[in-house]
Image (cartoon, rainbow, N blue to C red):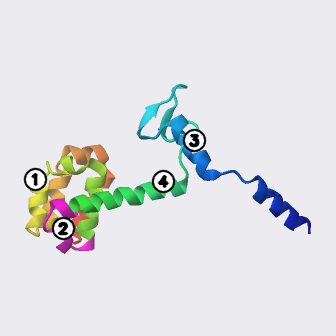
Amino acid sequence: MASVVSILVRVIKKMNEERLLEQLVIHEGLKLQPYRCTSDKLTIGVGRNLDDVGISTEEAEYLLKNDVKRCVDQCERTFDWFEDESDNVREAVVNLVFNMGMTRFLQFKKTIAHIENGDYELAGMELLDSRYAEQVGQRAIDVANQLSNK
């Protein structure tokens, strides 16, 4: 019987979550870009203190999936050939766009041209012959190999 009573007490004392959330958005604001709060803490969203709280693994995975979807959508809109490529090539291109952004990836004209022509090994070689490859090291080697193993 005690468990039924404790459940009833919790139900009766339950806050109005929707009202609380609305109030917090009003008081904290909703910022979709990181900013420094009045305590000089890096903050995002509705008062999420990134310096002290950070994000959970589940939140990071959620963000990652959204970011990958955004990159895939950009690739599908930008490259006529993207959907017809093998999984390895599409994954390599999404990896590159994810890492450097579409604007910067579009500067890799020779790499892109080689992919369009089906010259995947040359595309990988072009990628490795770049400042980007110097900056990211093993990642560039992995992506170049992925392109070559169409």
Residue 54: give x, y in percent of width and height: 54, 43
Residue type highlighted by circle 1:
Lys
**What is the distance, in whole Å, between disc 2 and disc 1 at their CAs?**
15 Å
Vertical placement of 14 versus 119: above or below? Answer: above
**What is the distance, in whole Å, between disc 3 and disc 2 at their CAs?**
45 Å
Position of residue 70 in the picture relative to residue 106 (left or right): right
Magenta stretch contains residue 112? no
Mark 2 against mark 1, which lies toward the viewer? 2
Assess disc 4: are there few (<14), some (14-19) or many (≥20) residues with their C-alpha within 10 Å of its C-alpha.
few
Mark 4 and mark 2 lie on one chain; the one further toward the N terminus is 4
| Residue at x-position 69% and y-position 51% | 15
Assess disc 3: are there few (<14), some (14-19) or many (≥20) residues with their C-alpha within 10 Å of its C-alpha.
few
Mark 3 against mark 2, which lies toward the viewer? 3
User: Is the N terminus in the top left, top right, bottom left or bottom right quadrant?
Assistant: bottom right
**Residue at image mark 3:** 23
**What is the distance, in whole Å, between disc 1 and disc 3 at their CAs?**
50 Å
Checking the image for residue 109, the label placed there is: 1
CB under 8 Å between discs 4 and 2: no
Residue type highlighted by circle 2:
Phe
Residue type highlighted by circle 4:
Ala
Mark 4 against mark 3, which lies toward the viewer? 3
Mark 1 against mark 3, which lies toward the viewer? 3
Position of residue 81 in the picture relative to residue 53 (left or right): left
Residue 104: give x, y in percent of width and height: 20, 46
**What is the distance, in whole Å, between disc 4 and disc 3 at their CAs?**
26 Å
**Residue at image mark 4:** 60
Assess disc 1: are there few (<14), some (14-19) or many (≥20) residues with their C-alpha within 10 Å of its C-alpha.
few
Q: Is label 4 in a helix, a strand or a loop?
A: helix
**Residue at image mark 2:** 82
Residue type highlighted by circle 3:
Gln
Q: Is label 1 in a helix, a strand or a loop?
A: helix
